[in-house]
Image (cartoon, rainbow, N blue to C red):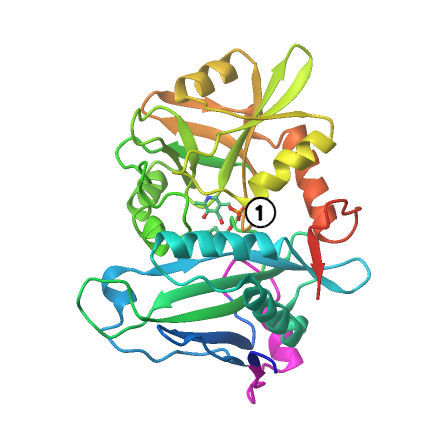
């Protein structure tokens, strides 16, 4: 017996309405017709889920998520393939990270098979919402929240797993044009022992004031430094970061090492592998702000770029910080970012071989 009941919406969008909603796609603004909901109760475990019309959910105002913030989420994408089929990129890696986040927030783990079953069912049901152009996709947003109605501070004994889907284009309004970043020196995203490695809602809530400082500085994104030294680059507001060095005639792609305080991005992991396959050396290590500035000034660093599910690969054209401002690659997209972006998108759209078996067909 299936653990998921399929209950199609009786007010799904017409093809005309859908076509209208899917023109000029931005990120996360349009939702498909359906969602998946799976309830959890302590003692009973995960119950039977349902795929049903996308819409409001009802819960108690005393729900623990609203007070104490037990909320985790994920993000992955389903892509139209060259042959017209649909495949999602490394969804089992997201299922795995979801459970790492759950464990950190004292939430129950969802069996990976149920995460993947929900994804497959929703993508199948809403396949008409998967856009076709390269760079467009159906962004899948799984979420888990604590729903016990009780004000005592303890782990909730009831949860909801939710999965929704958004046909999406570029994350940044300017598309793939290089972005400007602000290095946050006042606020810290995550400290050792905290929740930095988890994809929990609170990390994002705590980042918004720094993101608005970045906006005030005319920047698109904030760059976070480590909490102890306030010196080493960790990641960006919603993406990881890579640097491109030229060392003794060799191109080296470098990203900050995983410290427990930054999100272990699935795009980051994929790019470390893709970069090696494209003939670059790839390294994970610490990089300080001072080194960033000096390496650009000395011409040793030729590019920097952000990467993530939503951002794909977005070049960093300019950096602003209290230590000064600097421009990378004349503020234009560099060849390494462009090459890796193309390699990643080609793989995701089935236009290039998939030696790792990263694409999961629906
Ligand atoms: N860092 C943060 C804080 C993020 O929110 C994300 C997005 O998910 C990433 C990095 C990139 O992770 P991934 O490549 O798995 O999307
Ligand atoms: C993603 O890339 O999936 C993210 O979650 C980044 C941001 C939209 C939170």
Quadrant assignment, res 121: bottom right
Q: Is residue 315 above or below residue 291?
A: below
Considering every residue shown, the one lying at the far front of the view is 43
Q: Residue at x 55, y 36 (%)?
A: 178
- Give neighbour class at mark 1: few <14, some 14-19, many 20+ (Cα, 10 Å): some
Where is residue 246? Give x, y as percent: 62, 16
Considering every residue shown, the one lying at the far right of the view is 83
Where is residue 102? Give x, y as percent: 40, 57
Considering every residue shown, the one lying at the far bottom of the view is 10
Quadrant that contains the C terminus: bottom right
Q: Is residue 107 above or below residue 36?
A: above
Foreground pick, 113 / 246: 113
Asked if residue 169 shows in the view, the reply is: no
- Residue marked by disc 1: 175
Magenta stretch, residue numbers: 5-29
Secondary structure mostly seen in magenta is: loop
Asked if residue 285 shows in the view, the reply is: yes
Foreground pick, 355 / 122: 355
Foreground pick, 351 / 255: 255
């Amino acid at each position: 017996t299936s653990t998921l009941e399929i209950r199609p919406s009786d007010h799904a969008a017409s093809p005309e309405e859908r076509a209208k909603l899917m023109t000029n796609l931005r990120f996360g603004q349009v939702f498909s017709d359906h969602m998946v909901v799976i309830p959890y109760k302590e003692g009973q475990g995960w119950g039977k889920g349902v795929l049903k019309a996308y819409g409001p959910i009802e819960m108690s105002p005393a729900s623990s998520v609203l007070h104490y913030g037990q909320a985790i989420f994920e993000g992955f994408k389903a892509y139209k393939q060259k042959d017209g089929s649909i495949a999602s990129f490394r969804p089992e890696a997201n299922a795995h990270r979801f459970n790492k986040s759950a464990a950190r927030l004292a939430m129950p783990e969802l069996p990976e098979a149920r995460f993947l079953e929900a994804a497959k069912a929703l993508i199948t049901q809403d396949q008409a919402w998967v856009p076709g152009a390269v760079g467009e996709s159906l962004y899948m947003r799984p979420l888990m929240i604590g729903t016990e109605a009780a004000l005592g501070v303890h782990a909730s004994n009831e949860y909801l797993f939710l999965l929704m889907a958004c046909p999406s284009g570029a994350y940044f309004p300017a598309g793939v044009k290089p972005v400007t970043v602000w290095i946050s020196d006042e606020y810290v995203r995550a400290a050792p022992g905290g929740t930095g490695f988890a994809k929990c809602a609170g990390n994002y809530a705590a980042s918004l004031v720094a993101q608005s400082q970045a906006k005030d500085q005319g920047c698109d994104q904030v760059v976070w430094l480590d909490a102890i030294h306030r010196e080493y680059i960790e990641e960006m507001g919603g993406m990881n970061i890579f640097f491109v060095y030229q060392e003794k005639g060799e191109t080296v792609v470098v990203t900050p090492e995983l410290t427990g305080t930054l999100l272990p991005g699935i795009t980051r992991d994929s790019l470390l592998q893709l970069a090696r396959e494209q003939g670059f050396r790839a390294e994970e290590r610490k990089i300080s702000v001072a080194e960033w500035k000096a390496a650009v000034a000395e011409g040793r660093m030729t590019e920097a770029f952000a990467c993530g599910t939503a951002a794909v690969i977005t070049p960093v054209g300019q950096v602003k910080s209290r230590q000064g401002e600097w421009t990378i690659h004349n503020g234009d997209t560099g060849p390494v970012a462009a090459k890796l972006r193309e390699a990643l998108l080609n793989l995701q759209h089935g236009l290039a071989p998939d030696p790792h078996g990263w694409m999961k067909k629906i």
